[in-house]
Image (tube, rainbow, N blue to C red):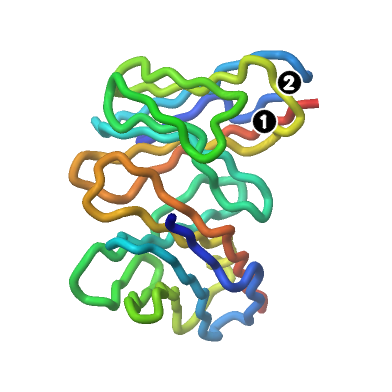
Amino acid sequence: NAGVTQTPKFQVLKTGQSMTLQCAQDMNHNSMYWYRQDPGMGLRLIYYSASEGTTDKGEVPNGYNVSRLNKREFSLRLESAAPSQTSVYFCASRGRGLHEQYFGPGTRLTVT
Amino acid sequence: AQSVTQLDSQVPVFEEAPVELRCNYSSSVSVYLFWYVQYPNQGLQLLLKYLSGSTLVKGINGFEAEFNKSQTSFHLRKPSVHISDTAEYFCAVTWANQAGTALIFGKGTTLSVSS
């Protein structure tokens, strides 16, 4: 039982490049989330998926898109990376009837 | 709108001393409250949660927190800290009785334990 996994762990992009961050969970959870963590800012919600087939914007969605590929997988795409998107990205999931979220190990992204 | 304020950005403490990390929230509806810990270069791990019932909740690693509705606070405490408790701690809140909603996080408190 791996919990929540994220790939890659580290990534360096040039401004304007695109990439997709992958997230998968093996806990049969319904809800999945993408957050970004910046120093002194805590975690801020980018997008979430309350259930398979639905996605909604969070607090900071600009510059990102998401896909809930199936119940297990929730990807985050940067179409044209900007230096302001340099951050640590965390994926999380939550099961039906639960209120806490379970987090992946994070992806550290640097955009130069 | 909900918000979470962690009143101290950094808390330095000596080993075996007690510690309190303070968290206040604002919400006009019932909430669930959480504390998470993040060790260096790792993801977030749930320390404890308050959903309902007893206002004193116990978590992992000897931590506990008290929910105070009148003060809208959820402070985290440990009677005797270890070097290994050095980490960043996040308080978070979510609306009760709403499926799929995300957590609102405070900005974090860095706990530094020295010998």
Q: Nearer the viewer, residue A90 or A63?
A: A63
* Residue topped by disc 1: A109
Q: Residue at x 57, y 24 (%)?
A: A64
Q: Residue at x 25, y 62 (%)?
A: B51
Q: Quadrant of the N terminus of chain B?
A: bottom left
| Snapshot quadrant of residue B79 | bottom left
The secondary structure type at the circle numbered 1 is strand
Task: Specify the label residue B107 is tagged with.
Answer: none
Residue B106 image offset from top left, x and y in percent: 53, 59
Could you tell which of marks 1 and 2 lies nearer the N-terminus?
2
Image location (x, y in percent) of residue B26: 43, 66
Residue type at mark 2? Leu
| Res. A105 in view | no
Q: Name the residue located 74 percent from the left edge and 15 percent from the top edge.
A: A16
Chain to which mark 2 belongs = A
Residue at mark 1 shares a chain with residue at mark 2: yes
Q: Residues within 10 Å of mark 1 (few under 14, many from 20)?
A: some
Q: Which mark is residue A13?
A: 2
